[in-house]
Each structure stands twice: as C-alpha cells, then as structure tokens.
Amino acid sequence: MLEELKKDAPKEVLDKIKEIEDAGITIIVVDGDPRVIVGDYNGGRIDIADMDKFPEGGGAGTKESTLLHELVEQFEKQINKDPYKDAHEDAIKAEEVLTGSDRQKQLPPVRNADGTITVVVVWVDKDGKQIHQEIVIDPTTGNVISVTNKPQP
C-alpha cells in the first residue's frame, strides 16, 4: 500500500513520506484487529483490513490517504511528541494535499438498527462539490465494513 501511496503523490507528500521513513518510527501493522479501527494513536497500530475498505480516488479519503494520515499521526506522536489533537490536524492536512480535497468535519456517529455505527466525514472536492464519506463500523468486531462516498446535491 505504501508503494501505491508514493506512485502519484505530489512532491510535498513524497517529501513527508521520506521524512517519516528516515525518522525510523515504529508502527505495528495488523489485519482485522478488533482493538483497532483504522488506526490506534496510543498503541501505534494501523489496521490494513480497515484501510482496504476505503476507495481509490473519488475526492474524499482513500486507501492511500488513510495510510498517509496514520503515518503522519505516528510521526508527529513519536518524533515531535505532539498530542493527539495536533498530530490529527497535521494528518488531515497531509490527506488534503494528497486528495486535493478539503476535509471539512466529522459528524457525530450514528448507531444503525443492525447495531453497526456510521461515521460521516464531510469533504469538499477540488471542484467545490461536497461529498459525505460514510464509514460503517461493526462495533462487535472493531472492523470497518464499508466506506461509501455520497456526492451531495
């Protein structure tokens, strides 16, 4: 997934990835870990099964931008000793550079009738169109079930 991230990334993102690689941070990569939903800031873990549910392209968060987000958060935590809030803001900025879209906000989670939870992240793409990225999570397994981009009228 890292090679895919590097493939079409702008220079600013490539420079950040190189800085992260050179810093020698430690990240535990898991696959379907119920304790990790995409990333675990405190535990330094990322879940590739969750990331794999994100789309490729589409003006909102992608597999690659989600990976970049988690890498930047861990870099800011481990190297710069940033608290979560600051590391998360830096990670969002990196995602925005990679996707070319503006990550506006995250709406409060909603519990669905089937017990799953939906989190909506609001993006505005480079053409000014709003996209609601709906992330459905199974709280019993800790796994992302689906990620759907829904363009808004």
Image: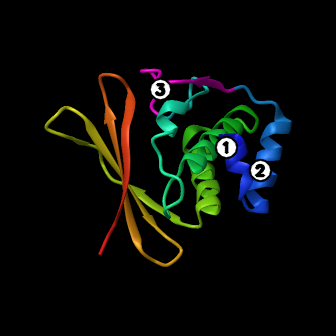
Residue 86 % position (x, y):
60, 46
User: Which of the 4 image quarters holds residue 67?
Assistant: top right
**109 sits to left or right of 50:** left
> Tag 1's secondary structure?
helix
State yes or no: discs 1 and 3 in contact (Cβ < 8 Å). no
Instruction: Identify residue type, mark 1.
Output: Val
Q: Are marks 3 and 2 in contact (CB under 8 Å)?
A: no
Q: Gap between marks 3 and 2, in whole Å?
A: 24 Å
The magenta stretch is: 27-37
Distance, label 2 to label 1, CA atoms, is 8 Å
Q: Residue at x 73, y 53 (%)?
A: 7
Q: Which residue corresponds to the image point at 76% horizontal and 46% vertical from the top-left?
A: 17
Where residue 35 sits: x, y (%)? Answer: 44, 21
How many numbered discs?
A: 3
Residue 82: in sight, yes or no?
no
Which residue is disc 1 drawn over?
Answer: 72
- Residue shown at 54% from the left, 74% from the top: 126
Q: In the image, what residue occupies the spot 61% across and 26% down? A: 44
Sequence-wise, which precedes: disc 1 or disc 3? 3
Q: Which mark is residue 36?
A: 3
Q: Which mark is residue 16?
A: 2
